[in-house]
Image (cartoon, grey):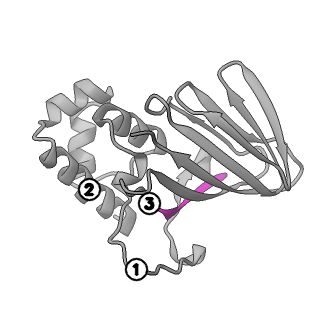
Amino acid sequence: MDNLSRIISENLKRVREEKKISLDAVAKLSGVSKSMLGQIERCEVNPTVSTMWKIANGLKVSFSEFVNHTETNVELISIDQLEPLIEDDGRVRIYPTFSFDSTRRFEIYSVEFQKNGYLSTEPHLQGTQEFITVFSGELTVTVGEKSFVVEVGKAIRFKADEPHSYKNTGDSNCVLDMVIFYPE
């Protein structure tokens, strides 16, 4: 398995142990089967973003708690050195640029959507907000029943504690940064 799968595996075990919770309990809280959770912990599968959101919400932790790495005083990030999370058959690449830290209360992702790339996510924890800035292309963000077109040079903020999705509805690739803020 790749390095990201190993990090997710180690972090899922750590979070579960810190909370003193069994795989059965995580399965009940998240809706993810005990067998799938075991495979993730044994680093036998590459879990999808949707699966990881279900686990994060069930455990009431941030998504990036699972892709976290040790923090230093200064961190210089190069996207080409990050392992992206892949969705929609490779049409969506999510780079965990800056992971969640409880003192900051946010995480940052760089995201690339190929033409017609689509991503749907589970509602996040109550009070969570997303801030998206589009640097190239066009993105349609659907929050609940309403859709919003965000073009290059524009940004959107929304409460992410209800179902929401993203689709590249432009004629070229869409590149954006996403900040997810978690309330205390």
Decide: marks 3, 2 in contact (CB < 8 A)? no
Residue 12 percent location from the top left of the image: 25, 50
Decide: marks 2, 1 in contact (CB < 8 A)? no
Residue at 32% from the left image edge and 36% from the top image edge: 60
Could you tell me the amino acid type at mark 1?
A: Asn
Mark 1 packing: few (<14 Cα in 10 Å), some, or many (20+)?
A: few
Could you tell me the amino acid type at mark 3?
A: Ser
Mark 3 packing: few (<14 Cα in 10 Å), some, or many (20+)?
A: many
Q: Is residue 121 left or right of residue 176?
A: left
Name the residue carrying label 3. Answer: 99
Q: CA distance from mark 1 to mark 3?
A: 14 Å
> Which of the two discs, 2 and 1, labels the residue nearer the N terminus?
2
Residue 164 percent location from the top left of the image: 62, 30
Whether residue 137 is situated above or below residue 127 in the rendered picture: below
Asked where in the image residue 33 lies, by quadrant, the reply is top left
Name the residue carrying label 1. Answer: 73
Mark 1, secondary structure of its residue: loop
Q: Which portion, as a residue range, is magenta?
A: 91-98
Q: CA distance from mark 3 to mark 2?
A: 13 Å
Q: Is residue 95 magenta?
A: yes
Q: Is residue 150 visible?
A: yes
Q: Is residue 109 magenta?
A: no
Could you tell me the amino acid type at mark 2?
A: Asn
Q: CA distance from mark 2 to mark 1?
A: 22 Å
The image's mark for residue 11 is: 2
Asked where in the image residue 139 lies, by quadrant, the reply is top right
